[in-house]
Amino acid sequence: MQMIKITVGPFDFTATMEEKDAPNTCAEFNRLLPYKTQVIHVRWSGESIWIPLGDFKLNVDYENHTSHPSRGDILFYPGGISETEILIAYGSTCFSSKMGQLAGNHFMTILDGRDNLDELGRLVLWKGAQDIVFENF
């Protein structure tokens, strides 16, 4: 089981890659590590933060996809109806865009640091974009 360290603003999380259920997404994302960018608060999906990726392609199709991620689930949306993105649920979420409901590949789950997810969501909502780094643990 591959573990990933995620640092967002002042918070550290440990996540596991969902290699059994989303092997292609995990393998392709792993090639990007360490991955550094920023997260912003979602517009339509509820209690989540996201990384807008525009036209970026990870060369994966749908696998282990859902529109209703649980708290701590991380999704990769491969694009199509809306832009490519990564979504991190910190609470109640129905993954969607201005075009309607979406489904993303659940490829990572936060295990450690979950107690800080609500505070992270509030930080991004009220203070704006935060730096995020994904790296091998």
Image: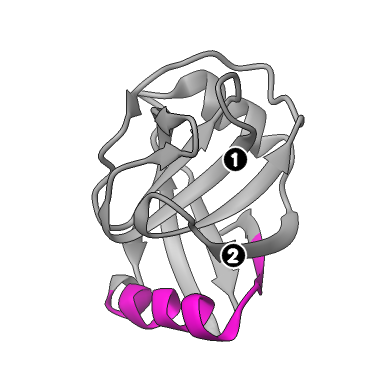
| Amino acid residing under circle 1 | Glu
Of the image marks 2 and 1, the number of the one nearer the N terminus: 2
Q: Residue at x 65, y 73 (%)?
A: 129
Q: Residue at x 35, y 73 (%)?
A: 117
Above or below, comparing residue 13 to residue 57 in the picture: below
| Amino acid residing under circle 2 | Ile
The one nearer the camera, 46 or 85, is: 46
Q: Which disc, if any, is residue 42? A: none
Q: Residue at x 70, y 42 (%)?
A: 53
* SS under mark 1: strand
The one nearer the camera, 114 or 97, is: 97
Q: Main secondary structure of the magenta part?
A: helix
Mark yes or no: residue 1 visible.
no
**In the picture provided, is 110 more to the left or to the right than 9?**
left
Mark yes or no: residue 83 visible.
yes
Q: Which region is colored magenta? A: 115-133
Bin the neighbour count of mark 2 within 10 Å (Cα to Cα): few under 14, some 14-19, many 20 and up: many
Above or below, comparing residue 72 to residue 122 in the picture: above
Q: Residue at x 62, y 52 (%)?
A: 51
The one nearer the camera, 1 or 11, is: 11
* SS under mark 2: strand
Query: Residues under labels 2 and 1: Cα distance?
Result: 11 Å
